[in-house]
Image (tube, rainbow, N blue to C red):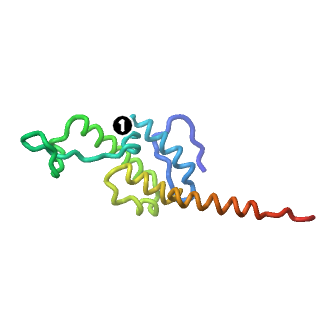
Amino acid sequence: MDKEGGFVNRTPLLDGSNYDYWKSRMSVFLKSIDSRTWKAVLKGLEHSVALDEDGNMTDVLKTEEEWTVAEDELALGSSKALNALFNGVDKNMFRLIKHCTVAKDAWEILKTAHEGTTKVKSAKIQLLTTEFENMKMLED
């Protein structure tokens, strides 16, 4: 493996076998881009709805031209994060997230694929605990 030092402009690469290493490095990488980039991963991006003449919300999404400055900033953060995530995975991992349009969705898909859901984690812990309790010391 190449040795790295100093400031890194390159995203860490997830190859399917190094998720824990990748996750910690990618989260720091995203935070180093700017604060809105990491926030986009944590909070996601909800598209705003248009208002009618009376100021009531409708079911129609705003077009990008109608976004406020704050909505534009959130979208930019999500785009930067999604770009980093797309570039930080190998071809096999990319297949899992290639249809994502929001960074939070891509992050959650990768997290679930490698860590599992809460139920899966609990089942794994229970299985390992049972295996450990059933272990016997071998005699020499």
Where's the C terminus, which quadrant?
A: bottom right
For label 1, the residue is 36
Residue 40 placement, left or right of 55? right
Dot 1 amino acid type: Arg
Quadrant assignment, res 48 = top left
Residue 9 placement, left or right of 122? left
Label 1 neighbour load within 10 Å: few <14, some 14-19, many 20+:
many
Q: Position of residue 123 (x, y in %)?
A: 59, 61
Q: Secondary structure at mark 1?
A: helix
Query: Who's the residue at 50% across and 58% down the image?
Result: 117
Closer to us: 35 or 94: 35
Query: Who's the residue at 53% across and 56% down the image?
Result: 115
Toward the left, the furthest residue is: 53
Quadrant assignment, res 72 = top left
Closer to us: 121 or 73: 121
Q: Position of residue 128 (x, y in %)?
A: 68, 60
Query: Who's the residue at 35% across and 43% down the image?
Result: 80
Q: Position of residue 49 (x, y in %)?
A: 19, 46
